[in-house]
Image (spheres, rainbow, N blue to C red):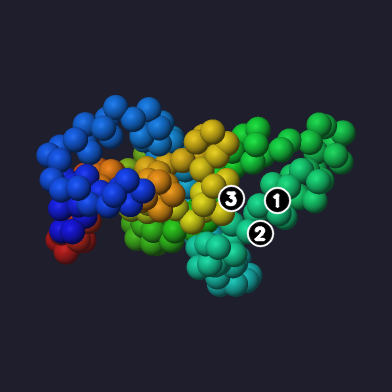
C-alpha cells in the first residue's frame, strides 16, 4: 500500500525529499523513460527465453530420470541440486569459474578447440544471464514434468506399442498431450520467478554494459537506491507488480483446473 502511495508523490532524496502529491507524473515519466522500455524488453527476453530453455531441458531430463536404471534416486537428487544452491554462491561461481575468458571453463574449451576466447559478460551479457538462469531453474521445471510423467497412463502407452506406434509417435500423441497442463503450469511458475530476477543480474553484470542486462526489477533498485528517486521507483514497482499479477492469475486458474481434473479421475 505504501508503494502505491509513494508512486503518486514527488519524492527524491537528492532534491529536497518529499515534495507532495504529483498525480500520475511518475507513471507518465516511466513511459517516457527509454531505459524503462529497455528494461521491459530485457525482462521479456530473459523471461521468455529462459522459460523456453528450462521447459525443453527440463523435459529431456525428466524423460531420462523417469526411466528405471541403477542409481536413479541419486541421479534425481543431484539433478535438483542447482535449484537449492544459494543464488549468490551460484552467480559468483559462474562469473569466475565459467564465464571468465582467462580462467573459466568456457574459455578453456575455446582454447582447447583453438577458437578465440569470448568475453561473455561484455560481448554477450544477456545470453550469459539466460544461461545462468536456465542452469538454476531447469531442476524446477524437471520436478513438475517428472511428476506429470509418473502419472502417465500405462495402459495407453502399452496400447500404442501394440498398435505399432514408435517412441516418437507415442511421445507426440500420448506423452505431450498428457503433459500439456504440467508444461503450462511450469512455464507460468517459471515466468513468475524469472520476472523478479535481481541477485543474478546484480552480481553477474550489475545491469550492464550500457543497461544491456537491466531488467525491470534491477531498474527499480537503480532508481530507488542509486538515484534516490523513491517516487519514480515506487511507480516502477507498481508496474512490475501488475505484470506479476497478470501472470499469477492464469497460473492460479490453471492450477485449480489441474486439481479439479485429478479429483474427477
Mark 3, mark 2: which one is toward the viewer? 3
Q: Quadrant of the N terminus?
A: bottom left
- Residue 78 falls in image quadrant: bottom right
Q: Which labelled disc corresponds to residue 204? A: 3
Do we see residue 61 in this rendering?
A: no
Relative to 131, 256 lies left or right:
left
Q: Earlier in the sequence, mark 3 or mark 2?
A: 2
Residue found farthest to the front? 16
Q: CA distance from mark 3 to mark 2?
A: 10 Å
The residue under the point 79% across, 36% down is 117
Of 5 and 93, the residue lying toward us = 5
Q: CA distance from mark 1 to mark 3?
A: 12 Å
Q: Which residue was labeled with disc 2? A: 93
Q: CA distance from mark 1 to mark 2?
A: 7 Å
Locate residue 34, reporting x and y percent. Answer: 37, 27
Question: Taking 83 as reference, is 125 above or below it?
Answer: above
Q: How many C-alpha atoms fall within 10 Å of the one at disc 2: few (<14), some, or many (≥20)?
A: some
Q: Which residue was labeled with disc 1? A: 98
Q: Earlier in the sequence, mark 1 or mark 3?
A: 1
Question: Taking 264 as reference, is 161 above or below it?
Answer: above
Q: Are marks 1 and 2 in contact (CB under 8 Å)?
A: yes
Locate residue 46, reporting x and y percent. Answer: 45, 40
The residue under the point 13% across, 45% down is 21
Amino acid at each position: 500500500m505504501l508503494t502505491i502511495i509513494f508512486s503518486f508523490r514527488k519524492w527524491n532524496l537528492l532534491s529536497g525529499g518529499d515534495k507532495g502529491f504529483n498525480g500520475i507524473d511518475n507513471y507518465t515519466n516511466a513511459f517516457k523513460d527509454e531505459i524503462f522500455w529497455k528494461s521491459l524488453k530485457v525482462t521479456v527476453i530473459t523471461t521468455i527465453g529462459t522459460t523456453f530453455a528450462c521447459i525443453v531441458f527440463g523435459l529431456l531430463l525428466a524423460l531420462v530420470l523417469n526411466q528405471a536404471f541403477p542409481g536413479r534416486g541419486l541421479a534425481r537428487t543431484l539433478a535438483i541440486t542447482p535449484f537449492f544452491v544459494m543464488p549468490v554462491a551460484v552467480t559468483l561461481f559462474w562469473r569466475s569459474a565459467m564465464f571468465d575468458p582467462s580462467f573459466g571453463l568456457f574459455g578453456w574449451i575455446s582454447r582447447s578447440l583453438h577458437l578465440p576466447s569470448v568475453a561473455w559478460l561484455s560481448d554477450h551479457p544477456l545470453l550469459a544471464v539466460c544461461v545462468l538462469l536456465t542452469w538454476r531453474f531447469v531442476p524446477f521445471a524437471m520436478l513438475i514434468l517428472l511428476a506429470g510423467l509418473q502419472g502417465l497412463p500405462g495402459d495407453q502407452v502399452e496400447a500404442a506399442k501394440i498398435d505399432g506406434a514408435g517412441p516418437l509417435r507415442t511421445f507426440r500423441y500420448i506423452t505431450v498431450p498428457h503433459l500439456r497442463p504440467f508444461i503450462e503450469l511450469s512455464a507460468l511458475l517459471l515466468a513468475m520467478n524469472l520476472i523478479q530476477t535481481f541477485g543474478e543480474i546484480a552480481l553477474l553484470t550489475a545491469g550492464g554494459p550500457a543497461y544491456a542486462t537491466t531488467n525491470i526489477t534491477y531498474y527499480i533498485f537503480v532508481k530507488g537506491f542509486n538515484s534516490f528517486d523513491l517516487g519514480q521507483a515506487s511507480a516502477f514497482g507498481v508496474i512490475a507488480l501488475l505484470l506479476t499479477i497478470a501472470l499469477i492469475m492464469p497460473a492460479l486458474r490453471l492450477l485449480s483446473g489441474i486439481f479439479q481434473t485429478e479429483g474427477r479421475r
